[in-house]
Amino acid sequence: MIHPGGLFKGDLEEPCIFCPGCKDTHVLPWKRGGWTFNGDTLKPTFMPSFRLYQDSVKGSGLCHFILTDGVINFCTDSTHPLAGKSVPLPEFPDETGDT
Ligand SMILES: [Zn+2]
């Protein structure tokens, strides 16, 4: 496994980000889904947006965002409190293991 570093965890082909809206990890399977990625692990840009359903976590919800230049732009149809806001991609909270 390649450790991508930067603000990602996991594999560069399916990096995980920490979502400050859901307070949870999201996997971005960009290669499988036809997204484009600028290759920058500190200021990543993916196109188009990611639309993630969070049925396993925190009830039923939708997290819809565009990641541009390391900033998560949450769409207004997201069901968490950061809907409509733009938030810099955070580092992962302190934890051990899981890499
Ligand atoms: Zn989220």
Image (cartoon, grey):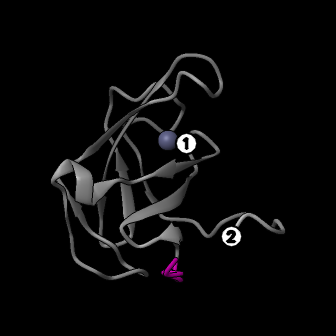
Image point (52%, 74%), residue name: 7
Q: Quadrant of residue 97?
A: bottom right
Residue nearest the viewer, comparing 77 with 9: 9
List the residue tagged with mark 2.
99
Residue 96 falls left or right of residue 58: right
Q: Main secondary structure of the magenta part?
A: loop
**Magenta region, residue range:** 1-6
Q: Note whether 13 is above or below 42 in the view shown.
A: above
Residue 26 placed where, x, y %?
50, 48
Q: Name the amino acid type tagged 1.
A: Gly
Q: Is residue 84 magenta?
A: no
Residue nearest the viewer, comparing 49 with 80: 49
Farthest residue in the right direction? 96
Residue 70 falls left or right of residue 59: left
Q: Residues within 10 Å of mark 1 (few under 14, many from 20)?
A: some
List the residue tagged with mark 1.
21
Image point (60%, 25%), residue name: 56
Residue 60 falls left or right of residue 33: right
The mark nearer the N terminus, 1 or 2, is 1
Q: Note whether 62 is above or below 83 in the view shown.
A: above
Residue 67 placed where, x, y %?
32, 59
Image point (54%, 32%), residue name: 81
Could you say which disc has been placed on residue 90 in the image?
none
Q: Name the amino acid type tagged 2.
A: Thr
Residue nearest the viewer, comparing 39 with 20: 39
Q: Quadrant of the C terminus?
A: bottom right
